[in-house]
Image (tube, helix red, strand yellow):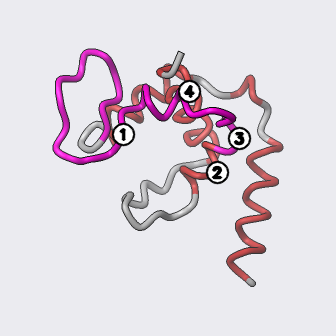
Amino acid sequence: MRRSLAASLLFLVVLATPPWAADADRGEILARRWCAACHVVATDQQSVTGQAPPFSTIGRTPDLDPSRLALFLLLPHPKMPDMALSRSEAADLAAYILSQGR
């Protein structure tokens, strides 16, 4: 119950972040630093050692909006390291990931 409440509150906070605050350029810097070991994060990246999907594939996911993706990045995942992203970093990274699917 407590985790559910925390996730709900976090979701509301992420939704309250204005979409224009996200910066895909800053998100690219984060992606290259934190994500490139497992994901292909840019077209100039050759390969990865992990089996995670490329950002271009994630960015093409139907109905995936920046708020939902930022929330996903903020919550702990079994297969992903805890990057301890701030809300603005998660929004920037989400904006970058979604830009790769276009």
Residue type at tag 1? Pro
Q: Mark 4 points at which residue?
A: 98
Mark closer to the chain start, 4 or 3? 3
Q: Mark 4, residues whose alpha carbon is within 10 Å: few (<14), some, or many (≥20)?
A: many
Q: Does the magenta stretch include residue 36?
A: no
**Residue at image point 73% right, 82% down:** 2
Main secondary structure of the magenta stretch: loop
Q: Name the residue under label 3.
A: 67
Residue 24's label in the rendered image is: none
Q: Where is residue 40 in the image (x, y as percent from the top left)?
A: 30, 31
Which marked residue is nearer to the observer: mark 1 or mark 3?
A: 1
Mark closer to the chain start, 4 or 1? 1
Residues marked 4 and 3 touching at CB (< 8 Å): no
Residue type at tag 2? Leu
- Compared to 61, does 38 lie above or below? below
**Residue at image point 56% right, 34% down:** 61
Mark closer to the chain start, 2 or 1? 1
Q: In which quarter of the image is residue 89?
A: top right
Q: Name the residue under label 1.
A: 53
Residues marked 1 and 3 touching at CB (< 8 Å): no
Which marked residue is nearer to the observer: mark 2 or mark 1?
A: 1
- Compared to 53, does 74 lie above or below? below
Q: In which quarter of the image is the N terminus?
A: bottom right
Which marked residue is nearer to the observer: mark 4 or mark 1?
A: 1
Alpha carbons under labels 4 and 1: distance apart: 13 Å
Q: Report the side of 27 relative to 10 (left or right).
A: left
Residues marked 2 and 3 touching at CB (< 8 Å): yes
Q: Is residue 65 visible?
A: no
Q: Mark 2 points at which residue?
A: 71
